[in-house]
């Protein structure tokens, strides 16, 4: 597609529920990144993929968070047993390959845990 | 580890006035530096990037930034502010070997008044 697409744009869920957030990167981009942006803060790195494999998941806060990219394109961020502290905007970005030259972000999914 | 500090969470300028948004970085190795802009309900958009070439970097929408190693700074400037520049601006750093994993500052909200 023309840009990085994230769905849903907004998600409200109850504490303890399971959620999935989807990211559709720019076609042909092999690198995909997830960030989380809490209110009043800059984005914080969660995980990145090179192709299908999670090359660095050091930013995932705990084992309730998991992400997959089974075919090297679309990625899903999965959060189990959601907590109110998980409320944030989850941002996805992609780039043609791993480099240090910046990448394209999606508009994000605003997750609210009530 | 690398980090960035953005001085001033809010900056207000008059339309037509100089815009100066400050960013200082900390890195044990030569960094790559970025400025992103975030408009309300939109994703982050890359304004400009420094990747060890020219120290004065020109970006989109008339913005530029100068890498000053001696001051560990990468301040963002624009000679004449426009109402459409009102947004949140984020400085970010990455270092070679981290696969473009970005560390963001906390952001500066720019307000432009008539």
Image: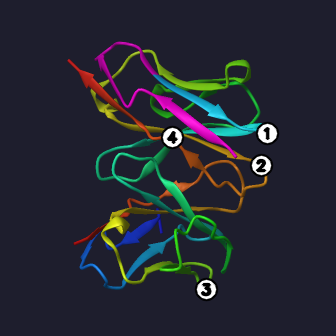
Q: Position of residue A32 (x, y in %)?
A: 59, 67
Please name the residue shown 70% across and 46% down the image.
Answer: B1
Judged from this view, the residue extending furthest toward the top is B17
Q: Do the residues under discs 1 and 2 have CB atoms within 8 angstroms?
A: yes
- As measured in the structure, the alpha-carbon distance from the residue carrying label 1 to the one carrying label 2 is 8 Å
Q: Residue B79, located in which quarter of the rendered image? A: top left
- As measured in the structure, the alpha-carbon distance from the residue carrying label 4 to the one carrying label 1 is 18 Å
The residue carrying mark 3 is A71
The residue carrying mark 4 is B105
Q: Position of residue B72 (x, y in %)?
A: 67, 25
Chain of the residue on which disc 4 is drawn = B
Name above or below for residue A6 compared with residue B70.
below
- As measured in the structure, the alpha-carbon distance from the residue carrying label 2 to the one carrying label 3 is 27 Å
Viewer-proximal residue, B87 or B108? B108
Q: Is residue A76 visible?
A: yes
Chain of the residue on which disc 2 is drawn = B
B82 left or right of B24 in image:
left
The residue carrying mark 1 is B29
Q: Do the residues under discs 4 and 2 have CB atoms within 8 angstroms?
A: no
Query: Which of labels 3 and 4 is toward the front?
Result: 4
B105 left or right of A28 in image:
left
**Crowding near the residue tagged with mark 3, few <14, some 14–19, many ≥20 C-alpha atoms within 10 Å:** few
Query: Which of labels 4 and 2 is toward the front?
Result: 4
Query: Which of labels 1 and 2 is toward the front?
Result: 1
- As measured in the structure, the alpha-carbon distance from the residue carrying label 1 to the one carrying label 3 is 35 Å
The residue carrying mark 2 is B96
3 and 4 marks on the same chain:
no
Q: Earlier in the sequence, mark 4 or mark 2?
A: 2
Please name the residue shown 41% across and 47% down the image.
Answer: A41
Viewer-proximal residue, A114 or B77? A114
**Crowding near the residue tagged with mark 2, few <14, some 14–19, many ≥20 C-alpha atoms within 10 Å:** some
Secondary element under disc 4, as helix, strand or loop, is loop
């Amino acid at each position: 597609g023309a840009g990085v697409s994230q769905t849903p744009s907004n998600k409200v869920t109850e504490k303890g529920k399971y959620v999935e957030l989807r990211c559709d990167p720019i076609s042909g981009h092999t690198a995909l990144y997830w960030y989380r942006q809490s209110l009043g803060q800059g984005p914080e790195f969660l995980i990145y993929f090179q192709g299908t494999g999670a090359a660095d998941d050091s930013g995932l806060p705990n084992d309730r968070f998991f992400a997959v990219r089974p075919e090297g394109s679309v990625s899903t961020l999965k959060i189990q047993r959601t907590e109110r502290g998980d409320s944030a905007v989850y941002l996805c970005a992609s780039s043609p390959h791993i480099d240090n030259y910046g990448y394209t972000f999606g508009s994000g999914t605003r997750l609210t845990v009530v | 580890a690398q980090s960035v500090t953005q001085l001033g969470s809010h900056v207000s300028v008059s339309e037509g006035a100089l815009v100066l948004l400050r960013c200082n970085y900390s890195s044990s190795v030569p960094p790559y530096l970025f400025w992103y802009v975030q408009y309300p309900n939109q994703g982050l958009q890359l304004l400009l990037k420094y990747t060890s070439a020219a120290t004065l970097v020109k970006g989109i929408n008339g913005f530029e930034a100068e890498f000053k190693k001696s001051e560990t700074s990468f301040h963002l400037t624009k000679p004449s502010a426009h109402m459409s520049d009102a947004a949140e601006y984020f400085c970010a750093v990455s270092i070679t070997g981290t696969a473009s994993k970005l560390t963001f500052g906390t952001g500066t909200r720019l307000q432009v008044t008539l």
